Structures are given as C-alpha cells and as structure tokens.
Image (cartoon, rainbow, N blue to C red):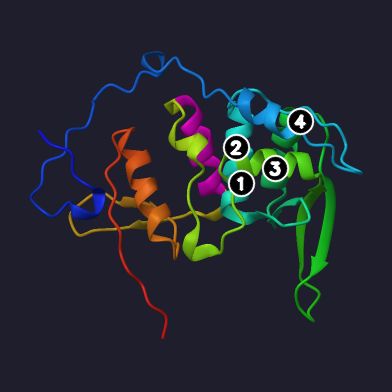
Amino acid sequence: VKNKDLSDIVPGDVVAISKRHDDADEDWDVDLSFLVDAVNRYTIKGAKDYVLPRKMTPALARVLGYITSEGCINTAGVICFCNTDQVLLDDYVKNFTECFGVAPKYREFQISTAGNKVHYYAESNRKVAMFLIGCGEQFKQAPDKEIPWSIMAAPRRIAREFIQAFFEGDGSYSTYDLPEQKSKVFMGFASSSTKMLEQFQSLLLRFGIVTSKHRYTSE
C-alpha cells in the first residue's frame, strides 16, 4: 500500500475504500474559534455585529455549498446566492440566518428584454465576508475554484450537507435506459476547475462513491 496523487491514478490501480460509513466514527468538529477571534479584532465602520459560529455546523456547510455553486463574495463584503428555485432560496435564507443571526435581503434583477428575472439574496457585511473567506470561500474565477478547506477537513455528517447544497445549486442528473438492463441514473456537475473536480472525487470517496471525469468542449 502506498500513497498516490489522484492525478497519477490510472486504469488498473486498486483503491482501498472503507465499507463502513457510520458518522459515529467521525465525532470531531472543525474548530473555527481562531477565525472568529481574528475577525473580531477588526473594527470595521458600518459593519453590523453578527454572530459568527465557532465551529463548522451543518447550516454553515450548506451556506458554503450554496455560495460555492451559485454564489459569490465580492471585495466590498457583499455575500450573495443567486437562483431561480424558491425552495433553494428559502433554504439558503434559513441556514444563513441560523449561522449569523440575521436574514439576508431579497433582491432581483432582469436578465433579458423578455422580462426574465433572477432572484437572489445578498447581505453586505465585511466581518461575515472575512469569516467565510477564512473558511475557504474565495474571490477566484471559475477555473480556480476550490472546495473550502473547512469542508475538506470536516467529518462526513458536515461534508454531506455541503455536497447536497452544492449539487442542488449546480448539479444535474439524468437517466439512461440501457438494452436488457435496469435504467441507470447519472449525477454530476460541470466545472472548469480541475482542482475542484479532483477535490470532489476525494470527498465522495469518503462515502464509498467512485466517480470519473469527462472532458466536454463547446464548438
């Protein structure tokens, strides 16, 4: 048995995967107290005093999942999540409020002359933005996106919430009827970030899920 980088794995390699997926085996928490203390040292004019969670929670994992998939944090400290599905928007608001004690504000904008609108929730608070960036969210463009370090270090019960929120925001699924076989369901997402794709492969292996990457080009 030896360590091997994910990029070096080739067809024919054997990977050991645990068949046990009992959350009780992973009873640790990701401590974020150092991050809260660091952010609270700053006095930021106009920033409201929100509550900042001192450990990674399921609600915070979902907020990170939504922002990583269909959200952003800009240099002005504005945190937003954009989607057309009201169920997802409501869930984002619920979890954001649980994390920080304040509900984000509703916004909408028109994206075409036909009157189509995109709905989103945004909150401007530099301390919350600094906290989320410290958790691993970034200002990076799509090709450089990564899964937050705080999720990669989290136990399965937390990582599961991030994965679910991310796929609800940016994932897809399809079914295929194969000759003389049962229908198969394929789930996936598209990204221009090789690093994030490989991180997801590693993360899903912790649940016993083996995945593969495929390259698609638009012409």
- Crowd band around label 4 with a 10 angstrom C-alpha radius: few (<14), some (14–19), many (20+): some
Q: Pinpoint residue 44: horizontal percent, then vertical percent.
A: 85, 41
Q: Amino acid at mark 2?
A: Arg
Please tell me which of labels 3 and 2 falls first in the chain: 2
Q: Nearer the viewer, mark 3 or mark 2?
A: 3
Give the residue displayed 24% in from the left and 58% down from the top. 178
Range covered by the magenta-colored residues:
157-168
Q: Is residue 46 magenta?
A: no
Query: Mark 4 and mark 2: span between their CA atoms?
Result: 23 Å
Q: Amino acid at mark 3?
A: Met
Q: Which residue is mark 4?
A: 40
Q: Pinpoint residue 188: horizontal percent, then vertical percent.
A: 40, 54
Q: What is the quadrant of the C terminus in the image? A: bottom left
Q: Which mark is residue 130?
A: 3
Q: Nearer the viewer, mark 3 or mark 4?
A: 4
Is label 4 in a helix, a strand or a loop? helix
Query: Mark 3 and mark 2: span between their CA atoms?
Result: 18 Å
Q: Amino acid at mark 4?
A: Asn
Q: Nearer the viewer, mark 3 or mark 1?
A: 3
Query: Mark 3 and mark 4: span between their CA atoms?
Result: 10 Å
Q: Are marks 1 and 2 in contact (CB under 8 Å)?
A: yes
Q: Amino acid at mark 1?
A: Tyr
Q: Nearer the viewer, mark 4 or mark 2?
A: 4
Give the residue displayed 27% in from the left and 44% down from the top. 210
The image quadrant of residue 103 is top right
